[in-house]
Amino acid sequence: MVNVVVVQNDPVFGNVSGNLEAVSRMLSERQVPRPDLIVLSELFASGYQFVSVSEVKELSEKVSGPDAGPTGSFMKNLSRETKGLVVGGFPCQKDGRVTNAAAVFKNGELLTVYDKVHLFDAENRWFSPGEGPLCLVDTDFGPMGVMICFDWLFPEVARSLALSGALLIAHPANWVLPFGPSGMILRSVENRIFTLTANRVGTESRGGLSPLTYIGQSQVVAPSGEVLARAPRETAAILEVSFDPARARNKTVASESDAFRQRRPALYHL
Amino acid sequence: MVNVVVVQNDPVFGNVSGNLEAVSRMLSERQVPRPDLIVLSELFASGYQFVSVSEVKELSEKVSGPDAGPTGSFMKNLSRETKGLVVGGFPCQKDGRVTNAAAVFKNGELLTVYDKVHLFDAENRWFSPGEGPLCLVDTDFGPMGVMICFDWLFPEVARSLALSGALLIAHPANWVLPFGPSGMILRSVENRIFTLTANRVGTESRGGLSPLTYIGQSQVVAPSGEVLARAPRETAAILEVSFDPARARNKTVASESDAFRQRRPALYHL
């Protein structure tokens, strides 16, 4: 069994240190001191609704090394404290570009950084899309995929990760469209994997742009489609759930139906 | 604009002539005398819960030619009457095998027969799986895909059809699992196409097998995910909807996001 914590926060745009403190306070109320995995939302400390390239640059960070920014350092320290995995989103400085990224830390070590491949709407103005590969991380409890928010709409992402062995997908998000929660249930069901979405709440309305209201409903879904936990729509919350990732090795849909063995790749045009 | 009719029926196992009459009565109440497309459920005239191979053989039919069975003849005549398309499911005799098939008739002519590729549970005992290709039909209002029931769970099917140009998918079903209705909303959303599911209602409990309760909720979903019409869970019903299939040519999810152009096939492992 693994113990996971999903953090649904309510960041204030640009107030990185305040947002990190708020996440710390939320996490201090957890029941399990050393969860195997903590999932934080997309851009959880910077906020989401950028209005200029210079603003994006200013809030972007290096994730590790001597110039590591506050968000990477926070995740690193948190993972050292729990001796487990921490996944969370931040605007990542990389060779003069900025990506919408998720870092994966384990016990104080950076395992990998995933750059979001499918950028949503105005993100295309602020971020460089990830060049891949999709993000699959080996963990003590089996392979874990990572994808970010809008990646979910492309069924190929969760499918590719699951076919490559992912038993669970950690999914930092800043959902504004209504289909995410039911959509991620389907990603679990069609791939028979656990999915853990950390969304945020609150509204951002900056620089004359249309307001963005984030829909909360962070959730943990089992391979059967059962919602093991779901956060409210409008308030910050943490979810704590235990499950056995090995359940996701079983791709049985019904006694004589299997979600993977019955695939017919030769007939698909993808 | 096309006018479509989706028929959610309540067949009695094995009573083919009675089931065809019941569908005729339901259709006699339609508002539009000549709908462009009528979608009937999977195995809509035979019933679903077979208990032996001999029973499957007995109820299987040829779809056309001098030995055409009653279900094919019914669909043919219906399409001649409406001068439009009719899609419906039946157990299809084919070279000594039986497939779980859907026929597509237009104005009295058989256009094609699709054999279900992904068989659900006990169907694996009764039917030969389809050998492809997936079913894409040219119509006056653009390319139409056809898939049958459990095909929906494999995201590759709707995706392949949509990438091949399908603006809508006609989807005869006999859903028993709960995820179909929300799942098909997602198939519309991720592919920005119309989906038309004709499910059935009722319970079958034959030959000591576990009872199967069909969950109704036949529906027509727009590319945006809007449910244009949905039938009840437990009673037979027809849905009549008009929509413009050309809306499905637009793959825009948000002003700067596109469900197709943003795909990154080189990064997927499928």
Image (tube, coloured by chain):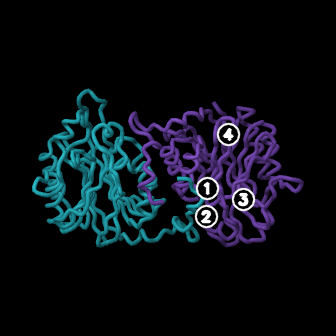
Chain colours: A cyan, B purple
- The x, y position of residue A3, in whole percent, is 27, 67
| Disc assigned to residue B5 | 4
Asked if residue A53 is positioned above or below residue A245 in the image, the reply reads above
Residue occupied by mark 3: B47
Mark in front: 2 vs 3: 2
Marks 3 and 1 belong to one chain:
yes
Query: Could you tell me the amino acid type at mark 2?
Result: Phe
On the rendered structure, is B89 left or right of A71? right
Image-quadrant location for residue B77: top right
Query: Could you tell me the amino acid type at mark 4?
Result: Val
Image-quadrant location for residue B252: top left
Q: Name, please, the residue furthest toward the right.
A: B66
For the point 26% across and 64% down, the residue is: A37
Residue occupied by mark 2: B120
Q: Name, please, the residue furthest toward the front.
A: A95
Can residue A124 be spotted in the picture? yes
Q: CA distance from mark 3 to mark 1?
A: 14 Å
| Disc assigned to residue B149 | 1
